[in-house]
Image (cartoon, rainbow, N blue to C red):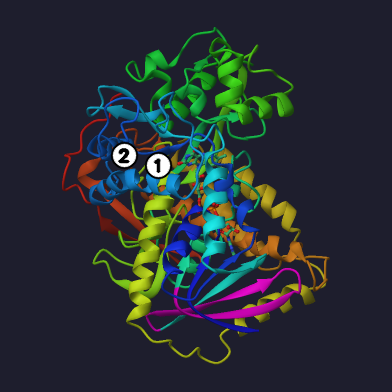
């Protein structure tokens, strides 16, 4: 089946819906999503969206931009960070005007709380910058945006999984998607396409990410020859529920929660004397792992599954149940522990990809250091790399990224549509996709996808975690490539046409494998430690050689690496102390 729209947006999370809202006022717009929109992972975002509103104390966008740059260990593009921080303020009021029920101060202003790495006056002390709706901020954003998109007559294709992009010459002309309910292939012709497909945390065994976070967008584009940026930087959130990885928001520490080791010590005093439990995530995740490796985890067995305590008992029942109701509920439900009375067992959980599809500040996909754009191709949200998060994202900055750069994407797409014509699709644009599906369905025997997935997640967790070493990464790179070869002969016993979710999970596994492989190759290549990328053989940051973005192109079994400059036009890189 064939469809034709001015704009096609892949993904109905915060980034996709905000872009859809903007572009749909001017052009015929479709959103294609493998999930029902309000099940998108943005709905899981808990703690808040950062903006220097200054509702409860003095704050400035300039301070927010600086914190973002420093938090990103100076790999953040500073021009992009300034846009993020300045436009965040308007974005939050915009969401409020669209109906988002933020928590309020007693005088009726939007309430704000502290979050890791956000400070007043260039690092003086923690500042209250995160605007929040209890611990359901992302859920409220999704509901608000989805309602507005319905009002704007955006056409939604739900439970349609995009399998391929169509790029002719240097122009993106559409996409190929699989309709889960009917098992049919659909081609969408478009003047422009936005990828807003979210994260890829499912590369890891313990993650805060939902099952659908399989990096489809970056993987599809990598196979189409588009390089990916800074994939070596993957964030571990310090506080996932022990053994499960489900997130306990930084908002708990923002409200005063304290991390403690088996001796009951507030160990962050050693690692970040000023910001303590509100230091950036990369530092806290390393501190927790160090405590565990040194035998001060709660079990004391130094294993990867050991944990520490997040103590919120002193905050009181009323505060916990009113400002962090989901966290209280998760802890009671999944651990049978009441956080009002007992500390929460937590350890770092794979959380967020700083890298992704390279874009400029108008969300256009660019493929080299000169900023060469692919006509009609855009990306925004977690799958993109603009790069505002550099080597380590600050909490609350992803939701801002979605809204600010989702909006910019929508505006730029509308401009692009007004001055471009449709490019006729070349014949057989969907043939390759159809062939892949037939080959998989027709295969009589082959490799078990479950085994491949389990092995990939084990390799990534054990060898590509918070601390990395050359020998472990080399082993990971080889093992992942071997799995990619096994995957060529993957098998499913489910031959159904309708609702064949096995087939789509196999497709997602292929995406994760490619991204895990690229991530590992990029990490091996970067011989320094910066932000979330910490190597024991190169423990220092090396600005002389490495103050540059990685661009990685997947060429079969090889990952070809080139570089892109970092914008450091405002603040000179300095050692990072908190
Ligand atoms: C538990 C948790 C809590 C968080 N809390 C915060 C917070 O408090 N503050 C903050 O700033 N950040 C937070 N984050 C991070 C933030 O929520 C995410 O980075 C962000 O929501 C991602 O939004 P997105 O629009 O890029 O993608 P998503 O919301 O993940 O949406 C992706 C969309 O793409 C679609 N899609 C994917 N692949 C395909 C395909 N092949 N075909 C069709 N559709 C496809 C999906 O259906 C979905 O609609 C949190 C993350 C987690 C996991």
Q: Residue at x 64, y 79 (%)?
A: 186
Query: Which numbered disc, 1 or 2, marks the residue that appears first in the sequence?
Result: 2
Q: Residue at x 49, y 32 (%)?
A: 103
Residue identified by numbered label 1: 397
Percent x, y of residue 317: 61, 15
Q: Are marks 1 and 2 in contact (CB under 8 Å)?
A: yes
From the image, which quarter does the N terminus lie in?
bottom right
Q: Is residue 568 above or below residue 19?
A: above
Magenta region, residue range: 169-192
Residue identified by numbered label 2: 68
Foreground residue, 556 or 323? 323
From the image, which quarter does the C terminus lie in?
top left
Can residue 562 be seen here? yes
Res 448 → quadrant = bottom right
Q: Residue furthest front?
A: 107
Label 1 lies in ligand 1 vicinity (Cβ under 8 Å): yes
Q: Is residue 289 above or below residue 146?
A: above
Crowd class of label 1 (few under 14; some 14 to 19; many from 20; radius 10 Å): many
What whole-number distance in Å separates the C-alpha atoms at marks 1 and 2?
8 Å
Percent x, y of residue 344: 62, 20
Residue 397 drawn in magenta? no
């Amino acid at each position: 089946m064939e469809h034709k729209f001015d704009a096609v947006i892949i993904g109905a999370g915060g980034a996709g819906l905000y872009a859809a809202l903007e572009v749909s006022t001017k052009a015929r717009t479709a959103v294609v999503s493998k999930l029902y929109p309000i099940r998108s992972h943005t709905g899981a975002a808990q703690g808040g969206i950062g903006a220097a509103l200054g509702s409860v104390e003095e704050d400035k966008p300039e301070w927010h931009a600086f914190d973002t740059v420093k938090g990103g260990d100076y790999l953040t593009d500073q021009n992009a960070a300034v846009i993020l921080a300045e436009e965040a303020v308007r974005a939050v009021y915009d969401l409020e005007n669209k109906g988002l029920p933020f928590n309020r101060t007693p005088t009726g202003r939007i309430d704000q709380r502290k979050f890791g790495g956000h400070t007043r006056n260039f690092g003086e002390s923690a500042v209250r910058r995160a605007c929040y709706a209890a611990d359901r901020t992302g859920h409220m954003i999704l509901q608000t945006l989805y309602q507005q998109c319905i009002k704007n007559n955006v056409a939604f294709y739900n439970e349609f999984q995009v399998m391929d992009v169509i790029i002719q010459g240097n122009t993106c002309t559409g996409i190929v998607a699989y309709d889960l309910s009917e098992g049919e292939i659909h081609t969408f012709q478009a003047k422009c396409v936005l990828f807003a497909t979210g994260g890829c945390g499912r590369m890891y065994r313990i993650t805060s990410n939902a099952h659908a976070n399989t990096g489809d967008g970056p993987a599809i584009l990598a196979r189409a020859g588009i390089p990916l940026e800074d994939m070596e930087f993957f964030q571990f959130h310090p506080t996932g529920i022990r053994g499960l990885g489900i997130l306990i928001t930084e908002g708990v520490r923002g409200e005063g929660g304290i991390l403690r080791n088996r001796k009951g010590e507030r160990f962050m005093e050693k690692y970040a004397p000023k910001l303590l439990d509100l230091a950036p995530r990369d530092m806290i995740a390393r501190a927790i792992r160090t405590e565990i490796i040194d035998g001060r985890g709660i079990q004391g067995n130094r294993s990867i599954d050991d944990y520490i305590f997040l103590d919120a008992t002193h905050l009181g029942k009323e505060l916990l149940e009113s400002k962090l109701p989901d966290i209280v509920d998760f802890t009671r439900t999944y651990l049978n522990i009441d956080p009002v009375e007992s500390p929460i067992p937590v350890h770092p959980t794979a959380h967020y990809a700083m890298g992704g599809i390279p874009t400029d500040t108008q969300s256009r996909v660019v493929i080299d250091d000169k900023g060469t754009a692919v006509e009609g191709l855009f990306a925004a949200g977690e799958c993109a790399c603009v790069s505002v998060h550099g080597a380590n994202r600050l909490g609350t900055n992803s939701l801002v990224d979605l809204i600010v750069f989702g909006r910019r994407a929508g505006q730029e797409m509308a401009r692009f549509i007004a001055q471009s014509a449709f490019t006729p699709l070349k014949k057989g644009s969907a043939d390759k996709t159809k062939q892949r599906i037939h080959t998989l369905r027709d295969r009589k025997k082959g490799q078990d996808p479950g085994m491949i997935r389990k092995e990939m997640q084990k390799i990534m967790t054990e060898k590509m975690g918070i601390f990395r070493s050359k020998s472990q990464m080399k082993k990971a790179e080889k093992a992942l490539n071997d799995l990619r070869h096994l995957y060529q002969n993957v098998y499913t016993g489910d031959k159904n046409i309708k609702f064949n979710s096995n087939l789509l999970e196999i497709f997602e596994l292929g995406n994760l494998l490619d991204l895990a492989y690229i991530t590992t190759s990029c990490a091996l290549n970067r011989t320094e430690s910066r932000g979330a990328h910490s190597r024991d053989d190169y423990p220092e940051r090396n600005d002389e050689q490495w103050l540059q973005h990685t661009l990685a192109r997947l060429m079969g079994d090889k990952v070809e690496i080139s570089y892109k400059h970092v914008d450091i036009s405002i603040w000179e890189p300095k050692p990072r102390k908190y």
